[in-house]
Image: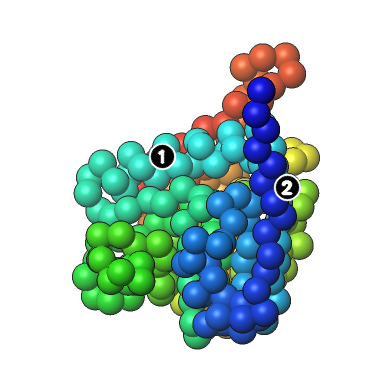
């Protein structure tokens, strides 16, 4: 029986500034697991495993609904985790749980795909610019970053809409829209529906499918 032990990765000294980090993130030496974000001069490293019921299940449900509403009608792309997006004006480079980029944003240059160093446009490893929607599912290891440090940076980068989902204790689903002074949290109606600028009325709910398990559903209503 053979064994393969993955050696701990090394953060090069050149990755301590923004452009150096970008070069490292596009290189073969960059780790293929975990999440490493550059947030205004700080490297935030999260190697925690993704929790199945309070993270990946929620992310999967939101992704499925975004795919049906964005990709199937050919309005744009949905990227699910491990897709790096960079905002030079905000000094931010991160891998959100979900990213939506509409074709219109690519066509008008609000977002661009950064090719590999071989300059092959079909082999991109990074997005740059203000994505149309960013979704973060909050976990124990990311709560400070997702709630405190990332939203002002996404706002500074011009991301028009940010969703935050937190189901660790109960269920909390937030739609934030960008205004002149940063993000504004939209209040749900009496039935829990929120009007997303991108999708219209949305409502994240949960229900018992098994005695010890919740399942999640993102409903999209008609305007």
| Quarter assignment of residue 215 | top right
What is the quadrant of the N terminus in the image?
Answer: top right
Residue at 60 percent across and 49 percent down: it is 33
Residue 61 percent location from the top left of the image: 50, 36
Residue at 51 percent across and 74 percent down: it is 22
Closer to the camera in the image, 110 or 28: 28
Q: Residues within 10 Å of mark 2 (few under 14, many from 20)?
A: few
Residue at 40 percent across and 62 percent down: it is 125
Give the distance between the C-alpha atoms of the residues marked 2 and 1, in whole angstroms.
Answer: 26 Å
Q: Which mark is residue 2?
A: none
Looking at the image, do the residues carrying marks 2 and 1 touch, with CB atoms under 8 Å apart? no
| Quarter assignment of residue 13 | bottom right
The residue labelled by disc 2 is 48
Relative to 184, is 173 above or below? above
The residue labelled by disc 1 is 65
User: Does residue 200 appear in the picture of this structure?
Assistant: no
Upstream in the sequence, badge 2 or badge 1?
Answer: 2
Relative to 90, is 216 above or below? above
Relative to 107, is 167 above or below? above
Residue 68 percent location from the top left of the image: 33, 39
Closer to the camera in the image, 202 or 109: 109
Residue pushed farthest front?
1
Q: Regarding mark 1 in the picture, which secondary structure is present there?
A: helix
Residue 95 percent location from the top left of the image: 54, 59
């Amino acid at each position: 029986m053979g064994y393969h032990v993955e050696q701990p990765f090394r953060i090069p000294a050149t990755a301590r500034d923004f452009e150096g980090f970008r070069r490292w993130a596009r290189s073969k030496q960059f780790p293929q697991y975990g999440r490493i974000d550059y947030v205004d001069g700080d490297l935030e490293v999260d190697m925690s495993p993704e929790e199945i019921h309070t993270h990946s299940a929620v992310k999967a449900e939101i992704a499925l609904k975004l795919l049906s509403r964005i990709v199937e009608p050919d309005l744009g792309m949905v990227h699910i985790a491990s897709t790096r997006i960079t905002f030079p004006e905000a000094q931010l480079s991160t891998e959100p749980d979900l990213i939506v980029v509409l074709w219109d944003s690519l066509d008008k240059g609000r977002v661009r795909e950064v090719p590999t160093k071989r300059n092959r446009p079909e082999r991109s490893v990074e997005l740059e610019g203000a994505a149309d929607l960013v979704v973060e599912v909050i976990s124990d290891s990311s709560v400070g970053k997702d709630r405190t440090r990332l939203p002002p940076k996404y706002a500074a980068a011009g991301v028009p809409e940010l969703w935050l989902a937190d189901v660790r204790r109960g269920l909390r689903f937030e739609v934030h829209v960008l205004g002149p002074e940063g993000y504004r949290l939209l209040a749900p109606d009496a039935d829990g529906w929120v009007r997303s600028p991108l999708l219209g009325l949305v409502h994240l709910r949960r229900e018992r499918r098994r005695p010890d398990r919740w399942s999640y559903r993102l409903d999209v209503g008609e305007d």
